[in-house]
Amino acid sequence: MNLIGDVKGKVAVMVDDMIDTAGTIAKGAALLHQEGAREVYACSTHAVFSPPAIERLSSGLFQEVIITNTIPVSEQNYFPQLTVLSVANLLGETIWRVHDDCSVSSTFQ
Ligand SMILES: O=P(O)(O)OC[C@H]1O[C@H](OP(=O)(O)OP(=O)(O)O)[C@H](O)[C@@H]1O
């Protein structure tokens, strides 16, 4: 894994489409810490959370792990640094806009 840029003393925000075993994001976070990042945040849409994801994500590498509820997270998989955001409003708004022939892309502008 290669890191481009200087992260020394910086707050790093990692964004990925999904976290499965958390191997990829944990490896990236470890490298960011190794290169001097002050804090590392992880953001991901889909939390598959196959073992050993919870161990990796709660090991102290991350200040916060922010995911959505596109995949339900069982209570036993919650850990202190985890924040789960709901996509309910976004999906509801999108369905409403498609139904009424309104723009969906303007939601994101
Ligand atoms: O939590 P993990 O078990 O590490 O899996 C998650 C990673 O797997 C996928 O990437 P992939 O390696 O499939 O490459 P891609 O995004 O280019 O398809 C995904 O985009 C994450 O980066």
Image (cartoon, rainbow, N blue to C red):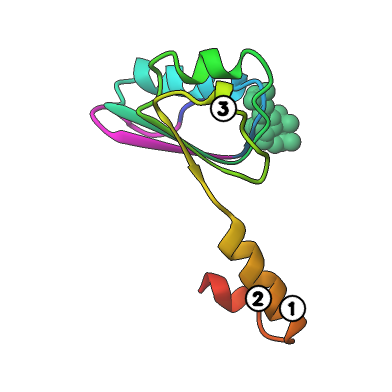
Find the distance from the CA under tag 2 to the CA under tag 1: 7 Å
Q: Is residue 59 magenta?
A: no
Residue assigned mark 1 = 98
Instruction: Say which mark, if any, is on residue 104.
Output: 2
* Residue type marked 1: Val
Residue type indicated by callout 3: Glu
- The quadrant of the picture showing ligand 1 is top right
Disc 2 to disc 3: CB gap under 8 Å: no
8 magenta-colored = yes
Task: Give how far across and how far down residue 85 sits, in percent.
Answer: 50, 47
Marks 2 and 3, the one that precedes in the sequence: 3
Relative side of 98 to 79, left or right? right
SS at badge 2: loop
Residue sitting at x 61%, y 33%:
73
List the single residue furthest toward the bottom: 101
The residue indicated by pointer 3 is 75
Q: Is disc 1's CB within 8 Å of ligand 1?
A: no
Look at discs 2 and 1 and give the one toward the viewer.
Answer: 1
Instruction: Please name the residue shown 55% across and 18% down the image.
Output: 54
